[in-house]
Amino acid sequence: MGFNKKRISRALSLYPFSAKTLRVVSPQPVSPLPIDCCTKMKVLIVDDERDLCLLLKNYLTRKGYETIIAYTLAKGLDELQRSSPDILFLDNNLADGLGWPMLPAILHRYPHLQVYLISAYNPPVPPIPEGAAVTLIEKPISFGDLSRRMKKMELAHHD
């Protein structure tokens, strides 16, 4: 079918500008958009209960989060360093150790991390640095409650 000047002229005449006003502009460098507007927030879930991890991952993925799972404390700490998440869900009783006692060291290294301490039991909470974004969640997790808490923490974190 090739170029048809009449068809092109007619198509251009349908738009509110004329072909005479069109000009080719050399591409200009565009400043990058802020990272926050384009990237998903990363969530790391460290828990040995696989079913809970998969439910949480499914829920958070539908909410627009990039979600990573680690089933042991060692893998969770490795993943924390590797992926630098924005949010951490940390269980206490893990197969290879206790997660909550690691909280002070984690917050020292990642002070802007939002942390959700999760447990079916009520273990003693380790010292939490002032201003740290830490929330306790008791298992079984209510997704309605989780959604409210995440919104509340997100609002507090952005102030």
Image (cartoon, rainbow, N blue to C red):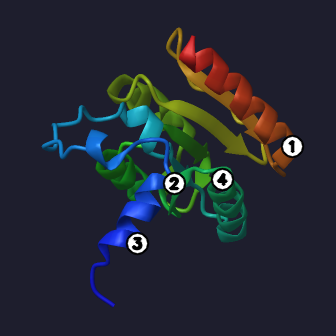
| Numbered disc 1: secondary structure | helix
Which of discs 1 and 3 lies nearer the camera? The answer is: 3
Q: Position of residue 97 (x, y in %)?
A: 50, 52
* Front residue (pair 39, 22): 22
The reply to whether dot 3 and dot 2 touch (C-beta < 8 Å) is no
Residue annotated with mark 3: 7
Kind of residue sitting beneath label 2: Leu
Q: Residues within 10 Å of mark 2 (few under 14, many from 20)?
A: few
Q: Which numbered marker is on residue 65?
A: none
The span from disc 1 to disc 3 (Cα, nearest Å) is 57 Å
| Numbered disc 4: secondary structure | helix
Q: Residues within 10 Å of mark 4 (few under 14, many from 20)?
A: some
Q: Where is 156 relative to 66, above or below? A: above
Q: How many marks?
A: 4
Q: Which residue is drawn at the image coordinates 43% and 42% (left, top)?
A: 38
For the C terminus, give its image quadrant. top right
For the N terminus, give its image quadrant. bottom left
Q: Which numbered marker is on residue 144?
A: 1
Mark 2 or mark 4: name the one nearer the start of the chain.
2
Mark 1 or mark 3: name the one nearer the start of the chain.
3
The span from disc 2 to disc 4 (Cα, nearest Å) is 46 Å
Would residue 53 be seen by someone viewing this image from the given angle?
yes
* Front residue (pair 124, 105): 105
Residue annotated with mark 4: 60
Residue annotated with mark 2: 14
Mark 1 or mark 2: name the one nearer the start of the chain.
2
Q: Position of residue 10 (x, y in %)?
A: 44, 63
